Image (cartoon, rainbow, N blue to C red):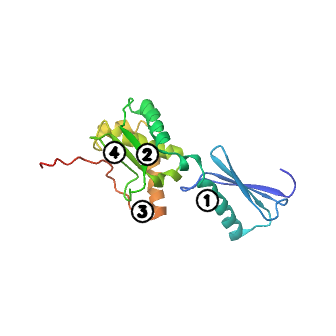
């Protein structure tokens, strides 16, 4: 790096990936941010310090995060992702539909084994891809084992980061001030019962 520049790498947090901050004396007023693999690279004026620097970096990261590909991806790409994960981890089980929803306030995702529908909270769009993948594998496993039985966990835990995902989502919920329920399976109620 040239004279008058510095690089600081901020570790990933529950709400964003690793961020590389490049401060340069050549930049006077403006900043920029871009994706470099799974890392965000932010370029800022070297004159920024302390809280002003943190706010400037946070604003650029937040703006870029709102434009990330999985944030804008639709139901078709989520459904395709579920198909690939089903082949990899859950014996090729097929869902009738997999879609993003905005009306789940107390769940990250849900599955209706009777209709074979999986719904994923749009709050997860901001999460790393591996978290979304682990959630999808969890829901796909419900298409084979409806309850949270040992057989269910044997299937769901085929995703190598399932336990890590649970910890991530616990922290994410805490950060968002949410109370998430453990129940993610919709049980069809018999009208006669």
Position of residue 130 measured from the top left corner of the image (x, y, whole percent): 51, 43
The residue beneath circle 1 is 62
Image position of 193 (left or right of 145): left
- Of residues 105 and 97, the one nearer the viewer is 97
Sooner in the amino-acid sequence: mark 4 or mark 2: 4
Question: What residue does disc 2 label?
Answer: 163
Q: Which residue is mark 3?
A: 178
Q: Earlier in the sequence, mark 2 or mark 3?
A: 2
Above or below, comparing residue 152 to residue 2 in the picture: above
- Neighbour class for label 1 at 10 Å: few (<14), some, many (≥20)? few
Seen at 45% across and 35% down, the residue is 85
Q: CA distance from mark 3 to mark 4?
A: 20 Å
Name the residue located 80 percent from the left edge and 63 percent from the top edge. Answer: 46
Of callouts 1 and 3, the N-terminal one: 1
**Could you tell me which secondary element the residue under label 1 belongs to?**
helix
Q: Earlier in the sequence, mark 1 or mark 2?
A: 1
Give coordinates of residue 175: x percent, y percent.
Answer: 49, 62
The residue identified by callout 4 is 111
User: Residue 184 vs residue 127: left or right?
Assistant: left
Q: Residues within 10 Å of mark 3 (few under 14, many from 20)?
A: few
- Which comes sooner in the sequence, label 3 or label 4? 4
């Amino acid at each position: 790096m040239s004279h008058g520049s510095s690089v600081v790498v901020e570790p990933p947090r529950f709400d964003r990936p690793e961020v590389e901050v490049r401060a340069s004396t050549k930049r006077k007023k403006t900043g920029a941010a871009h994706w470099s693999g799974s890392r965000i690279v932010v370029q800022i004026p070297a004159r920024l310090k302390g809280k002003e620097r943190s706010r400037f970096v946070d604003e650029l990261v937040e703006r870029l995060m709102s434009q990330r590909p999985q944030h804008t991806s639709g139901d078709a790409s989520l459904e395709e992702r579920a198909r690939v994960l089903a082949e990899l981890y859950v014996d090729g089980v097929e869902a009738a539909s997999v879609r993003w929803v905005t009306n789940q306030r107390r769940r990250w995702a849900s599955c209706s084994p009777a209709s074979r529908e999986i719904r994923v909270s749009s709050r997860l769009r901001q999460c790393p891809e591996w978290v979304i993948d682990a959630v999808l594998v969890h829901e796909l496993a419900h298409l084979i084992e409806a309850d949270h039985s040992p057989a269910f966990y044997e299937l769901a835990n085929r995703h190598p980061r399932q336990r890590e995902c649970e910890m991530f989502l616990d922290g994410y919920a805490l950060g968002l001030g949410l109370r998430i329920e453990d129940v993610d399976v919709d049980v069809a109620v018999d009208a006669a019962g």
